[in-house]
């Protein structure tokens, strides 16, 4: 995936450093997600039952990886569609060159999102029917009987709608309302928690709302950072007006994501029969994954604070900063959190 | 931004209202015989109880005796939160392991084991080998379970038949197949649109050779 242009040979060291940072961002985000989801899944696999065929390693590890790719593609699409709101519409001569690169990419990534969601449906059908290659009948039956399949199908539809409206935006530019594109992309995220756990209690709806907020907040935060760091850092003038806006959004997201994550994670555990808090936090795989996510959030805090309080004032004064490199660290941690999140949605709670 | 947030709230609210009812992750809460129990007489069936209803279909239960012989008999029946499996007359005394894999109501497969100890030889063991020494257990118990002679092959075949029957039914109703057709047609149109638009966008973005290739389909993970 080549997101950015290679700098010309005579490019200044500054431009070359930014290109390196961009490559690191893409590579770091994807690889940390994949590594985290593989480790998380290895620790929380299904307990083997004697005499019952279990899904093979291809499904056991392939499914969570593809499932994590849905998240990454969706996050990128959300970030790229939010970018015009962050850039603002006041100075098209400056923002249009950026957006003309962002819009086609958003369409392509929406396609990746849709394809990954479809592949995940096939994988999940295969997981339920170990030892056989899923036929169309198996997949149709899976989708018609299991809510997770319907949720993924809905997400696919939103991703394709996002690709469709993204195409209109490629053709007609910003006359296609940015809000519409953002809402469709975010809508596609909403069914994702349905594929995870839920509890059967009066608290079901509040917990679902909390999970939805978690998913939306995380996508806006990660996606927004990704888009700003990939496409805006080259232009100091643009960065000086964009980063403060993103910073406000990120602060809100940080609060929402941490609170909703704690609420939904802990209450899911508390409401599962046979799970004793607080002991279960360190005795179950689910609890450990939850701890890992809290640790990732704590690791993000100092980095986010450094960008917000040290670098942002200098960015606003149009000075050169190492903000892209700090963002690499932030996105690597966010990727790991996404990987763990996927393992968490699949880990048995008890 | 405020307009956007309002739109989002509304969108989220509609989705929640339209969302499917509570789908929870099941947990095994009890069983008959109990996990780790010691019993003198073999049960005629095993009952596993979960905290919430188990989904029909996909459920599998095995009963494996000392020496690896299989004792489950018949088909799994799911009744609300209870999953029941018939058990053939047990063989010699020893540890029996019950393995299960069921589909949780939130769509996740859940698997696990419980075990119980048979303190006295069952009818299958005494019939073939009155001395009931531990040595020839495997041999003596093998003929004792003629019904589940090839149990692992049976349930998938059954569920397969059920699946294809359901698929045929769906096709008859025109529901699934028509939907697939519509979705397929829409996808082809969208794909053509993508290719054309990205081709056209290329010259405009020629300053940035990094524009993604017009064939995103190849990028699927």
Image (tube, rainbow, N blue to C red):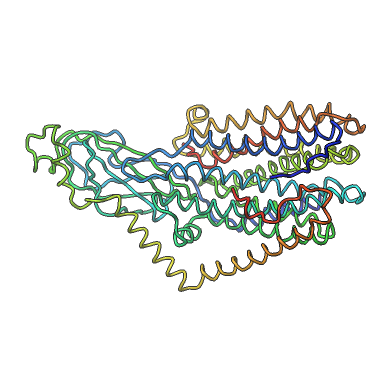
Is residue B147 toward the left or the right of residue B221 in the image? left
Is residue B11 toward the left or the right of residue B158 in the image? right
Image location (x, y in percent) of residue B16: 62, 54
The quarter of the picture where residue A20 lies is: top right
Vertical comparison of A158 with B114: above or below: below
Vertical comparison of A118 with A40: above or below: below
Q: How many marks?
A: 0
Quadrant location of the N terminus of chain A in the rendered image: top right
Image location (x, y in percent) of residue B27: 43, 42
Question: In percent of the image, x 34 and y 38: which residue is there?
Answer: B113
Question: In percent of the image, x 33 and y 57: which residue is there?
Answer: B157
Image location (x, y in percent) of residue A6: 78, 41
Vertical comparison of A302 with A167: above or below: above
Question: In percent of the image, x 46 and y 69: which residue is there?
Answer: B170
Is residue A137 toward the left or the right of residue A214 in the image? left
User: Along the line of sight, which residue is nearer the eye, B29 or A170?
Assistant: A170
The quarter of the picture where residue A257 lies is: top right
Residue found farthest to the left: B130
The quarter of the picture where residue A308 lies is: top right
User: Along the line of sight, which residue is nearer the eye, A106 or A79?
Assistant: A106
Image location (x, y in percent) of residue A273: 45, 38
């Amino acid at each position: 995936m080549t997101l950015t242009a290679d700098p010309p040979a005579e490019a200044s060291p500054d431009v070359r450093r930014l290109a390196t940072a961009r490559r690191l961002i893409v590579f770091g985000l994807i690889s940390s997600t994949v590594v985290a989801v593989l480790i998380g899944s290895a620790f929380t696999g299904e307990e083997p039952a004697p005499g019952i065929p279990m899904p093979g390693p291809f499904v056991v590890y392939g499914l969570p990886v593809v499932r994590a790719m849905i998240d990454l593609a969706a996050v990128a699409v959300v970030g790229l569609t939010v970018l015009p709101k962050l850039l603002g519409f006041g100075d098209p001569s400056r923002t249009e060159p950026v957006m003309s690169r962002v819009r086609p990419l958003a369409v392509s990534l929406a396609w990746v999102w849709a394809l990954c969601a479809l592949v995940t449906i096939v994988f999940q059908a295969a997981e339920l029917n170990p030892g056989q290659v899923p036929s169309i009948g198996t997949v149709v039956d899976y989708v018609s009987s299991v809510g997770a399949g319907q949720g993924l199908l809905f997400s696919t539809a939103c991703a394709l709608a996002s690709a469709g409206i993204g195409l209109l935006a490629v053709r007609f530019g910003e006359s296609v309302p940015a809000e519409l594109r953002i809402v469709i992309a975010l809508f596609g995220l909403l069914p994702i928690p349905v594929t995870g756990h839920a509890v059967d209690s009066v608290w079901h709806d509040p917990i679902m709302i909390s999970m939805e907020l978690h998913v939306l907040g995380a996508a806006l935060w990660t996606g927004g950072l990704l888009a700003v760091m990939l496409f805006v850092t080259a232009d100091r003038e643009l960065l000086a007006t964009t980063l403060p806006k993103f910073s406000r959004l990120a602060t809100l997201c940080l609060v929402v994501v941490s609170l909703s994550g704690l609420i939904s994670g802990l209450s899911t555990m508390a409401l599962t029969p046979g799970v004793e808090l607080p002991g279960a936090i360190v005795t179950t795989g689910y609890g450990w994954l939850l701890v890992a996510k809290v640790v990732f959030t704590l690791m993000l805090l100092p980095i986010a604070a450094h960008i917000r309080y040290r670098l942002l004032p200098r960015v606003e004064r149009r000075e050169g900063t190492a903000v892209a490199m700090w963002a690499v660290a932030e996105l690597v941690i966010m990727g790991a959190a996404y990987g763990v999140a996927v393992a968490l949605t699949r880990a048995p709670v008890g | 931004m405020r307009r956007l947030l309002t739109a989002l709230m509304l969108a989220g609210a509609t989705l929640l209202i339209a969302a499917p009812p509570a789908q929870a992750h099941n947990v095994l809460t009890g069983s008959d015989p109990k996990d780790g129990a010691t019993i003198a007489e073999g049960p005629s069936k095993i009952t596993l109880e979960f905290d919430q209803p188990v989904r029909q279909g996909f459920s599998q239960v095995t009963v494996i005796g000392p020496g690896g012989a299989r004792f489950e008999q018949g088909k799994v029946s799911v009744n609300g939160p209870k999953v029941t499996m018939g058990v053939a007359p047990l063989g010699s005394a020893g540890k029996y392991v019950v393995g299960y894999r069921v589909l949780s109501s939130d769509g996740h497969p859940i698997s696990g084991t419980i075990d119980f100890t048979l303190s006295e030889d069952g009818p299958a063991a005494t019939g073939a080998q009155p001395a009931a020494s531990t040595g020839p257990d495997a041999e003596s118990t093998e003929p004792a379970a003629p019904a589940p002679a090839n149990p692992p092959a049976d349930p998938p075949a059954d569920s397969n038949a059920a699946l294809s029957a359901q698929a045929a039914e769906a096709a008859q109703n025109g529901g699934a197949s028509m939907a697939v057709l519509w979705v397929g047609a829409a996808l082809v149109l969208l794909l053509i649109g993508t290719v054309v638009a990205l081709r056209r966008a290329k010259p405009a973005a020629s300053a940035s050779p990094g524009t993604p290739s017009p064939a995103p389909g190849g990028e699927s993970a």
